Every structure is written in C-alpha cells, then in structure tokens.
Amino acid sequence: MLARWREQSRHWPMDYWLLGLIITLVVIGLMMVASSSVAISEQRFGHPNHYTIRQFISVGLGLFAAYLFFHVPLSMWENHRGKLFLFAILLLIAVLIFGREINGSKRWLSLGIMNFQPSEFMKLAIVFFMAGYLDRHASAVKEDFGAVLRLALPFGLMAVLLLLEPDYGSTLVIAIMITCMLVIAGAPWRYFVLTVFPMVAILVALVVTSEYRMARVTSFLDPWQDPFGAGYQLTQALIASGSGGWFGAGLGESVQKMLYLPDAHTDFLLSIYGEEFGFIGVVFLVLLYLAILHRLFRIGRKALDNHHFFGGMVCFGIGIWIILQAGINMGVNLGAFPTKGLTLPFMSYGGSSILMMSIAFAVVFRVDHETRFYPRSKPKKASKSSKKPKDSEESESNKKKSPPPKHKRAAQ
C-alpha cells in the first residue's frame, strides 16, 4: 500500500502529504488560540472570541497570499533576492523609528488591521538571499573562507538592527539558518563555529552587562527562586505543562489560561496545549513538526537532484527556520531556554508569523511543482575532447595556407 501511495504521489501537482500536515497544524493552532485566549479576550475586549476572530482573519490572509505567491516563478525570487534583502533592512530601520513598543521591545509596525513584525519578513528574505548567493558561489564557499566573509557586512548590519529592537531570538535563529545553509551547500563544518560563535559571544556580553537581561537568565535557571516575580511566567508555564499528565485535562479545560499564565495565546501556547492534551499530545505535536521537516528536506533533495539548486536551498532554509523556531519555543515553554519571544509556527497567535509562514510554504510548493514538471538538465562543461576537432581543423587550414616544402617545390 505504501509503495502504491508513493508511486501515485509522483504524479501529484504538489506534495499533498506536506499540505495535509500543514492543514493539521493550522487546525490545531486555531483550536488552541480559541481555547487559550478566552479569559484574556473577555478581560480586554468584553467578549471571548476577539483573538480567535483575528486569528481566523490572519489564516484567511495567509491562504490568499499563499495562492498568489504559488504562481510566482522561482526565477523572480532568484533575480530580485538582493532587492528583497534591502527592503527588509529598510523595514528594520522603519520599525526602530515608527515601530510600536510592547513590553519594552520595538518589533511591530502598525498596519491598521494587524501589527506587522519585520523580523519575520527578514527570515524569508535571508533564505532567498542565501540560496541565490550559494547558487552563484557554491564552489568558492567550499574552498575559500573569503567567500563567507563577504557576507559579514550585510548580515552584520541586519544583526545590529535586530539587537536594537531588541530581538535576540530572531537574531540567533537567522544566524543558525545562515550557517546551516552554508554547511548544507558544502562549506566546511568549522564555518559553523566561525559564524555562530561571534554572535553567541555578543549575546552573552549583552546579557552580562544588563541587570534586566541577567535577571531573566537567572530566573530561567531557577524560576522557583522568585515564583511571583521574575520567575512567575515560567513557573506558571511549568505548572500548566505538568498538570496535563499523560493524556491532558481535555480541550478547553485548562486552568492556567484563566489569567494565571501571561501570553497564553502567543509565546506560551504550548503550555496550555500540554495542559489540555498531555504528554501524548505534545509528543504528537513534536512528531508533526518533524514530519514537516522531513517533507521539506525531501523536496529540497529532489530539487537538487533535478538541478534546481536555488529551489533546493530555499526548501532547506525554510525547513531549518520552522524546526529551529518550533524547537526554541518548545524549549522556552518547558524551561530549557530563556524567554525569546518566538512564536510556535502556524499555531501561536500572530498575523505576521502566519502570513510569512504561508508565503514561505507557498514558495516550497512552487519548488516542488517546478521540480516535478520542469526538471533541468545538468549543465554541460566544455571538455578537452570537444576542443580537439576544432584544433585539428585549425591545423588543417594552416597546412593548406602554408607554402609547400623546398624539396617538393624542386620536384615540381
């Protein structure tokens, strides 16, 4: 049966397995936003469905954007990747000037119907920029570290702008995305240390020199030292996760969402999910993200095999993006990492994340579509054997043009 399904899937216009996994994730996310935001929505807006309605609108906009961007050929992204990166830089500058400040961070631009987070757009722009750069300089990246150093200026500027917001989580995610794409393209493993270590060193220095950031780190290491102060959010998240047991209290039966756990519908949605669906539900969610990663890497591998190098690297970059962000968010909810402000992809409340993820996966489906129906032939390289006939023809013509030897002229 599996062999028959695998054979049938080769004739599909797109990867329906990946589409089904994403739809499952979106449906679970809508249910959890509706469940986790009841109390806070009632308190702030007087009715329990405010955030649920807005999340449905975000999903609708995401579907519409995905439909439009699916019809954009990959060559457009490849040819205009530099312009997209510059536009993302301008958005990061704009958010520092005109951005909306929430909880001490300027990360959002108000668009009226929604708040837009430029760092989410930067993640997608980085994937396109790196895929195009590696497509043009793949051999140089494998042999010359100077090809990697040329990326320091644009990405250094990007990192500075993100740290000024501040948005340490997105900075770390983008740094690891860049490095992993370099390694997948064939760069030596030492580049991982040479590119990520300076970024980690800067983040550590910023934490050490700030009492507020140091307090957040120490509270993460032992939140029970100050359970009603700096460690309040994490302790409530751990109580929610632990209350779920093996099978959870049931959908809608969470207690911590009743204004005990702050940001229950955004960064700490997983804790409410764990309380309502238990350990088994969390394991299922982890497997769901891993299955999505597998399909993304499979599409990327097929694209490389069919000589769509740019498209293949885009799939790898988006796969690293989603699994890294999901892993960090889960680690924060379970007390493994300090709070980073990263959403759970396709699940947490947030229009920017839903919109950018929808566009990103529309591009992935476009890669799969072009790989299936427009495979490329391997580029031909000029060989020595191909040059021999030309050289022999030139030598023959030279012989005809040159005068005959002296003894032949004498004989004539």
Image (cartoon, rainbow, N blue to C red):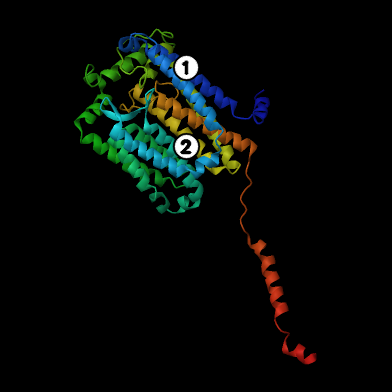
> Where is residue 9, by image quadrant?
top right
In percent of the image, x 43 and y 45: which residue is there? 189
Q: Amino acid at mark 1?
A: Ile
Percent x, y of residue 24: 51, 19
Amino acid carrying mark 2 in the image: Gly
Looking at the image, residue 233 sits to the left or right of residue 285; the answer is left
- Choose top left, top right, bottom left or bottom right for residue 89: top left
Q: Is residue 287 visible?
A: no
Q: Who's the residue at 60% across and 37% down the image?
A: 370
| Numbered tag placed on residue 232 in the rendering | none
Q: Tell me, yes or no, whether the two marked residues, 1 and 2, touch with CB atoms within 8 Å.
A: no
The label on residue 317 is: 2
Residue 28: mark: 1
Q: Earlier in the sequence, mark 1 or mark 2?
A: 1
Graded by Cα atoms within 10 Å as few (under 14), some (14 to 19) or many (20 or more), the crowding at tag 2 reads many
Question: Compared with residue 126, is residue 27 higher up or lower down, i.e. above or below?
Answer: above
Residue depicted at 46% across the width and 50% down the height: 141
